[in-house]
Image (spheres, grey):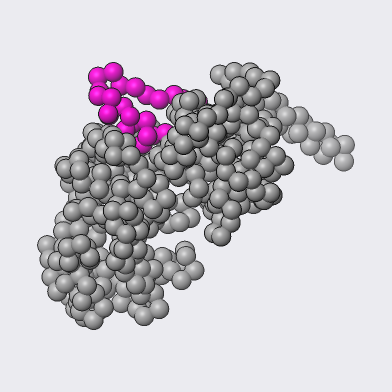
């Protein structure tokens, strides 16, 4: 018994030492907080902060359906459990009412709460660390101006040991370093503004970069595409022409996609539709163009030539053609040509032929809905077919459209459709 107690004491002591070391490491580079608030809020600062909060899409995570704006409580599913967003309203008991702008800046820049706790990176401080203090102060001034809501912050529901500060300390020591905007002196001011928005407030890499087993991204794989954890939508690569790269697009078309959700070469669906609806449609023309310029300048991936696709069985293609004729041709056309301004063409559409067919299967099952924007206020949508088509029919019709009218891509198996239903409880 004594030996067991001694062992437990040793383990606890070791964990305490580790925690202390990690805490010290995570405090490096932090300046002491001023004793009192120094920010002088003005109507102009609040207005600027409101714009920046839209660019950062803050409301999407910090507002529940039907809840008060920015009052938190939305559950963000992760592979490690659920993180609940916090109350950002100026309520003194539950929100930011007792915070100072310096404490808010520390949360944005260092990922640390008012009381010193390490924050979970579901709050994308690995990106927000590049936001300037001036922009952080503007966002804080805006949040202090919204109506206070006394919504209590919900506790996270994370598994052990992820729910400990020690585990967060380890994660940060491995994957997080406070940063700053990366100004490229050889590039234009427009390019650098775009880089700041894409990599900072826009936090585009949070979705469009693969994550490792511990949920971290790396700069080396930035923008190369990845499956969004738990949501199970594939965020295509932004630096590959075969996926979502825009290097060869006209800059005005990239701007149109960001501000309206539609462009001559493609449209947005799934999680990106929400991003356009809540965030990028509100970009100023100058900022939208700056982001477009930066995205077009991304170094392109050097991908090896894909292996020749296996020709799907004729029985699968015949079955898919029949489903397509009955369910799809009325909108997308007999030859997959679509209808300009209404229904997208499927022939030559890179979203159809992605090597990962997840998004195509999800759209057939759940439907696809463009965001309603000022530039496209009444978009057409695609109804869900999960109640009408079997797994075999969905596999056949997706295989058919991926291999018709000049399209070439691997076929879709029934098991892939089954897994898509299982993941979302369809």
Extreme residue in the front direction:
43
Q: Which residue sits at x=76%, y=29%?
A: 13
Residue 403 is drawn in which quadrant? Answer: bottom left
- Is 196 covered by the magenta stretch? yes
Q: Is residue 267 left or right of residue 249?
A: right
Give coordinates of residue 213: x percent, y percent.
49, 44
Give coordinates of residue 104: x percent, y percent.
58, 31
Residue 90 is drawn in which quadrant? Answer: top right
- Is 350 covered by the magenta stretch? no
Residue 312 makes an appearance in the image: no
Vertical placement of 272 versus 300: above or below? below
Q: Which quadrant does the N terminus fall into?
A: top right
Residue 100 is drawn in which quadrant? Answer: top right
Q: What stretch is highlighted in magenta?
A: 173-200
Residue 142 makes an appearance in the image: yes
Give coordinates of residue 274: x percent, y percent.
40, 54
Q: Is residue 189 left or right of residue 91?
A: left
Give coordinates of residue 306: x percent, y percent.
19, 50
Is residue 220 or residue 149 the one in the foreground?
149
Q: Which residue sits at x=79%, y=37%?
A: 8
Q: Which residue sits at x=34%, y=64%?
A: 368
Q: Which residue sits at x=25%, y=24%?
A: 188
Extreme residue in the right direction:
2
Count of numbered tags: 0
Is residue 131 or residue 6 the one in the foreground?
131
């Amino acid at each position: 018994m004594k030996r067991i107690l001694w062992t437990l004491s040793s383990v606890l002591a070791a964990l305490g030492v580790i925690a202390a070391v990690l805490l010290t490491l995570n405090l490096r580079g932090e300046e002491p907080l001023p004793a009192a608030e120094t920010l002088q809020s003005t109507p102009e600062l609040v207005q600027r902060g409101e714009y920046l909060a839209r660019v950062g899409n803050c409301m999407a995570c910090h507002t529940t359906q039907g809840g008060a704006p920015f009052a938190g409580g939305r559950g963000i599913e992760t592979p490690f459990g659920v993180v609940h967003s916090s109350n950002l309203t100026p309520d003194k008991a539950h929100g930011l009412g007792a915070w100072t702008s310096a404490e808010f800046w520390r949360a944005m820049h260092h990922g640390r709460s008012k009381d010193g706790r390490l924050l979970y990176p579901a709050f994308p401080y690995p990106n927000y660390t590049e936001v300037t203090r001036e922009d952080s102060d503007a966002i804080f001034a805006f949040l202090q101006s919204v109506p206070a809501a006394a919504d209590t912050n919900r506790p996270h529901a994370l598994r052990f040991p992820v729910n400990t500060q020690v585990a967060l300390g380890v994660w940060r020591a491995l994957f997080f370093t406070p940063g700053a905007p990366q100004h490229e002196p050889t590039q234009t001011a427009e390019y650098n503004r775009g880089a700041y928005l894409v990599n900072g407030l826009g936090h585009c890499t949070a979705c469009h970069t693969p994550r490792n087993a511990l949920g971290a991204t790396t700069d080396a794989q930035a923008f190369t595409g990845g499956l969004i954890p738990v949501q199970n939508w594939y965020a295509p690569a932004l630096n590959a022409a075969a996926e979502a790269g825009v290097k060869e697009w006209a800059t005005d078309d990239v701007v149109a996609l960001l501000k309206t959700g539609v462009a001559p070469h493609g449209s947005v669906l799934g999680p990106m539709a929400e991003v356009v609806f809540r965030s990028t449609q509100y970009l100023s023309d100058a900022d939208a163009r700056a982001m477009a310029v930066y995205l077009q300048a991304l170094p392109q991936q050097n991908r090896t030539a894909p292996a020749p696709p296996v020709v799907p069985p004729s029985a699968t293609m015949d079955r898919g053609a029949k489903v397509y004729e009955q369910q799809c041709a009325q909108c997308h056309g007999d030859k997959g040509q679509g209808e300009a301004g209404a229904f997208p063409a499927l022939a030559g559409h890179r979203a159809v032929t992605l090597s990962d067919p997840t998004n195509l299967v999800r759209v057939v099952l759940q439907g696809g809905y463009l965001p309603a924007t000022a530039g496209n206020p009444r978009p057409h949508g695609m109804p869900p077919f999960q109640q009408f088509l079997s797994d075999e029919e969905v596999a056949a019709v997706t295989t058919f459209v991926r291999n018709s009218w000049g399209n070439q891509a691997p076929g879709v198996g029934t098991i892939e459709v089954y897994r898509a239903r299982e993941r979302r409880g369809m």
